[in-house]
Amino acid sequence: MTIPVSLVLLLGTAVFLAWRCAGMRVWHAVICMLFGFYLAQTTAAPEVRHLVSSLINVLTSPQR
């Protein structure tokens, strides 16, 4: 599936732009990365994955 790879690239780009343009520090990015890593190992991970999938479906569905 290409959506998770594109989403990772989009989020990586957002982190890079926040670091370069918005004054985000490297340790902020490291904390966010660790938070995501540990969140993926919790019982909340399936709900987060479902929420992200639903948002992607809404954003990519054809407009009526």
Image (tube, rainbow, N blue to C red):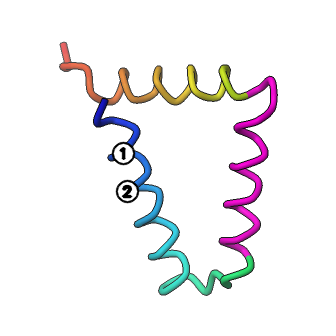
Look at 28% across and 36% down and name the residue there.
2
Judge from the rendering whether residue 48 lies leftward or rightward of residue 15; answer left or right.
right
Whole-angstrom CA distance, mark 1 to mark 2, is 6 Å
Look at 61% across and 86% down and name the residue there.
23
Judge from the rendering whether residue 52 lies leftward or rightward of residue 3; answer left or right.
right
Q: Mark 1 touching mark 2, by CB under 8 A?
A: yes
Q: Is residue 22 above or below residue 4?
A: below
Q: Looking at the rendered structure, which numbered label has been put on residue 5? A: 1
Q: Quadrant of the N terminus?
A: top left
Q: Nearer the viewer, residue 16 or 62?
A: 16
Image coordinates of residue 5 in percent, x first then y, are 36, 45
In the rendered structure, which amino acid carries the disc numbered 1?
Val
Question: Magenta stretch: residue 16 in it?
Answer: no
Image coordinates of residue 63 in percent, x first then y, are 20, 19
Image coordinates of residue 36 in percent, x first then y, are 69, 49
Query: Which residue lies under the disc numbered 2?
Result: 9
Look at 18% across and 19% down and name the residue there.
62
Q: Is residue 36 above or below residue 32?
A: above
Q: Secondary structure at mark 2?
A: helix
Q: Looking at the rendered structure, which numbered label has been put on residue 21? A: none
Image coordinates of residue 26 in percent, x first then y, are 66, 83
Q: Please provide the residue range marked out in magenta.
A: 28-44
Question: Magenta stretch: residue 40 in it?
Answer: yes
In the rendered structure, which amino acid carries the disc numbered 2?
Leu
Look at 70% across and 71% down and name the residue there.
30
Q: Quadrant of the C terminus?
A: top left
Judge from the rendering whether residue 2 lies leftward or rightward of residue 35; answer left or right.
left
